[in-house]
Image (cartoon, rainbow, N blue to C red):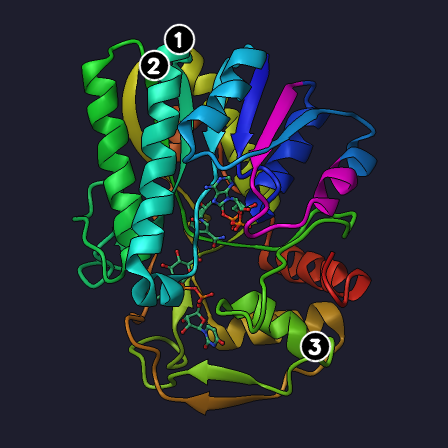
Amino acid sequence: MKILLTGGAGYIGSHTAVELLNKGYEIVIADNFSNSDPKVLDRIKQITNKTFVHYEVDVSDYNAFEKVFIKEKIDTVIHFAGYKAVGESVKLPMMYYENNLMATITLINLMNKYGVENCIFSSSAAVYDSSVARLLTEETPLSCTNTYGYTKLMSEQIFKDAARANPRLSIVLLRYFNPIGSHESGMIGDNPNGIPNNLLPFITRVAIGKLERLSVFGNDYDTRDGTGVRDYIHVVDLALGHIAAIDYCKEHKGAIAINLGTGKGYSVLEIVHAFEKASGRKIPYVFTARREGDVDEYYASTTLAKQVLGWEAKFGIEQMCASAWNWQKQNPDGY
Ligand code: NAD
Ligand code: UD1
């Protein structure tokens, strides 16, 4: 069975590629490397000792992307391709709408034209109104605070409409919580450009000595230690969730949204301490003002994922931190 991974050279895509190849799937990667390094392709091959085809292509470019569908007989698409930086999306909204929405629309048009029926989409907990509840179920009201979140919410709607119009489609909208960590080899990992926005890559860069100290955004939240609580999930668990979704697509039609999280929340300070324990490095930090748009605490309801995908996260926070450190230590300057 051939799986097309748009954005397959990125952080989550590369980890999913490894798990798919290990399970014997044939894969095709389509990526324009706008936020990834082509070196990742060799790393995937080294880890798995398997080979695959890749296309350097902008998936929002219909004519260019169509060549992939002409050449490859695709069974299922996993659609990772998109921009993901929340702050940048607020500054450059048109760039985000153009890339993320056009990629989704182009993909669906090509799937319809070439009879590809199954698609798994990288959505986000950013689609929830996280101010209304801490435990977020798939029924929690949806609302966004930034352009990035809206591109995910709008893409979800586009997929739902496409599935209504074409009853042969099977669409799984996976709402990721906070993916962290790396493959156990330490050969692939999260590699953001510039100063990281997200907590874990910031911590690993403090640990490696590239950044002086962590700013903890707020210590007056209504949480057990005053710092923000999130549901961190190991990227390998997340990758395995996609494989469960491929199986689900074979048996079901229509569109469904499913959370991928652990159901457990950790505070910023708990993460700092877990990372210090896993790495043996001290992480100096200071408390600073809250970051705009952040909320106290939220974590995933995992019931639906267990029920319909038969999937649940296995890795604990120690393994998440240890693997994030292993990647950073082996690749102090990224790829
Ligand atoms: P990433 O930036 O590492 O990977 C995305 C990949 O898509 C990159 O390799 C990039 O080059 C590629 N890409 C972007 N636009 C493209 C286009 N038009 N054509 C072809 N390739 C394109 O991001 P990631 O962390 O691996 O995230 C994957 C997906 O999951 C994204 O859609 C992201 O929004 C979503 N997501 C990520 C997180 C997270 O915390 N990492 C959380 C929720 C959802
Ligand atoms: C952020 C995005 C979310 C996106 C997700 C994954 C915002 C408001 N939300 O989630 O839409 O889906 O990333 O890309 O940007 N923190 C610090 N210091 C730091 C960095 C983070 O204290 O330098 C804290 C934050 O306040 C938060 C926690 O660490 O409490 C996690 O932050 P982060 O990794 O950025 O993820 P989210 O904010 O949950």
Res 207 label: 3
Residue 41 position within the rendered picture, expressed as x and y whole percent measured from the top left: 72, 39
**Residue drawn at x 36%, y 12% as measured from the top left:** 113
**In contact (CB < 8 Å): disc 1 and disc 2:** yes
Instruction: Report the Cα–Cα distance between label 2 and label 3.
Output: 47 Å
- Quarter occupied by the N terminus: top right
Q: Nearer the viewer, mark 3 or mark 1?
A: 1
| In-image side of 201 versus 139 (left or right) | right
| Residue 122 horizontal/vertical position (percent) | 42, 40
* Residue 116 on image: x %, y %: 42, 13
Name the residue type under label 1. Gly
Q: Considering the numbered disc 2 on the image, is that residue within a helix, a strand or a loop?
A: helix
Is residue 304 visible in this depiction of the protein? no
Residue at x 30% of width, y 65% of height: 90
Circle 3: residue type: Ala
Residue position for label 1 = 115
Q: Which secondary structure, mark 3?
A: helix
Report if residue 134 is visible in the image. yes
The answer to if 32 sits in the magenta stretch is yes
Q: Magenta residues?
A: 25-44
Q: Which mark is residue 12?
A: none
Q: Earlier in the sequence, mark 2 or mark 3?
A: 2
Residue identifier under label 2: 112
The answer to which of 36 and 210 lies nearer the viewer is 36
Other-residue count near label 2 (Cα within 10 Å), few / some / many at <14 / 14–19 / ≥20? some
Q: Residues within 10 Å of mark 3 (few under 14, many from 20)?
A: many
How many other residues sit within 10 Å of disc 1, few (<14), some (14-19) or many (≥20)?
some
**For the residue marked with disc 2, what is the amino acid?**
Asn
